[in-house]
Image (spheres, grey):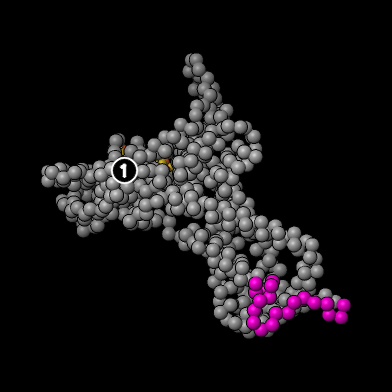
Amino acid sequence: MNLKLHVWRQKGPKDKGRFETYDATDVLEDMSFLEMLDVVNDGLEAEGREPIAFESDCREGICGACGCMINGQPHGHKARTTTCQLHMREFSDGDEIVIEPFRAKAFPVIKDLVVDRSSFDRIIQSGGFITARSGSAPDANAIPVAKVEADRAFDAATCIGCGACVASCPNASAMLFTGAKITHLGLLPQGQPERYLRVDKMVSQMDSEDFGHCGNFGECTLACPKSISLDVIAQMNTDYITAQFKGRDI
Amino acid sequence: MSWLSRFLRSTIGQKIVMAASGLMLVGFVLAHMVGNLQIFIGADALNTYAAMMQGNQGPLWVARLGLLGAIGAHIWSAVKLTIAAKGARPVAYKKRSWFDERYAVRTMRVGGMIVGAFIVFHLLHFTVGYFEGGFQHCADINGVFTCFAYQNVIGGFANPLVGVFYIVAQVFLGLHLTHGVWSMTRTLGFGNPRFDLIARKVAMVVGLIITIGNCSIPVAVMAGYLN
Ligand code: SF4
Ligand code: FES
């Protein structure tokens, strides 16, 4: 299959950037989207041109490193899929594909399709520690956790921090990501001691990173490769409201 | 105080202001509609209701100031959040497509502004009484405090353009509510999946009832059913 790619090229953070058009020829349908880009890059390098910079690590959908806007949707149009797990069989011969970096003030472009997502790291850091008992490992069942809560916490914990939620949100909000982190710790007994302190700190950090607010559009949860539920945002709101009544000073 | 200013500066705090003021406003909109629908019972019913309201200036002004406060808070939070949201994505995408194509969520801002403009017009129209064709203010007639709400409604929709504007505004208000009422429950923290299914339906029904209920009046006048 042959494709026409319109790719965002930007030499560095200061560069203005522009779209360039490339032909991707003889693309196999079993290639992943990133493998297709690898092949295009081989071609560019052979011609002595600068290859397209993009991020990847695990290439099996679990690390969250990859990700770009593919035809206006983060990780492409296929639901519950990361860019590395998107296969070229989802496209057809002659397709034109627009490839852009995730766009948000909090995700500045480093180069081409690579953005700096350390704002996510700072949100995580602001959450601080959880009080855990040191010493010998506790018995596996010593702390009871209800099955429903365990499931909800686990679902929230599957967030891989890819940033697709921010990229897809019309307001570039990070609430699905932050809500996932708040929920997965907040529902477990181990997360209780700092639960309300944590939500207050993480929300402040999130706001200071210049993300937008949540309008409950719900585009994020559909774009999320892990289908993190919008419920985590409601959970974060609940915890945030409760935190206001706890009256702790930070 | 530092707690409050922190809360009001946070995006979640601002959303809560928006949701709480929205709750007040939707309550008013429903009550206002029910009151107005008395026009279908007859001229006397509506005029008596109007006289009851206008005859109690004290409580009326308390309610008016409360509503003004809610509208102010709703607009304040919308402006704050919208400015921040615009700043959160300085470079737009060249190409954008959506998983969710629903219309209501995309018309919150524009619909809100249309409804805002409508409120100003509506107040000038039926409260201040600024329209051609003779608005009749409430007056003492033979010692009885009498209002002419019914006659004013008929006269007010003599110009079909006014009626059309009312109908368009109510459609946008309905759309605003089908998303807004549900979104409000999420913002106020009611995220329980069981509750959520009900909240979505309630929001849909509220939006529909408001649109149909409020549109029925200009439609009935313009169709000549009320005269
Ligand atoms: S919530 Fe989903 S889209 Fe957002 S960072 Fe986590 S995995 Fe990615
Ligand atoms: S490269 Fe790890 S998720 Fe795509």
The verdict on residue B128 being magenta is yes
Q: In the rendered structure, which amino acid carries the disc numbered 1? A: Pro
Per the image, label 1 sits on a secondary structure element best described as loop
Quadrant of image for the N terminus of chain B: top right
Crowding at dot 1, Cα within 10 Å, few <14 / some 14-19 / many 20+, comes out as: some
Q: Residue at x 49, y 58 (%)?
A: B105
Point out the residue furthest to the left here.
Answer: A47
Q: Is residue A146 visible?
A: no
Q: Is residue A243 left or right of residue A208?
A: right
Residue B90 image offset from top left, x and y in percent: 40, 51
Give the image quadrant in which the ligand numbered 2 is located: top left
The verdict on residue B214 being magenta is no
Residue A168 image offset from top left, x and y in percent: 40, 50
In this rendered view, identify the residue nearer to me: B113 or B101: B113
Q: Residue at x 69, y 64 (%)?
A: B31
The chain holding disc 1 is A
Q: Residue at x 83, y 77 (%)?
A: B140
Residue B41 image offset from top left, x and y in percent: 73, 76
Identify the residue under disc 1. A13
**Magenta segment, which residues?**
B124-143
In this rendered view, identify the residue nearer to me: A129 or B54: B54
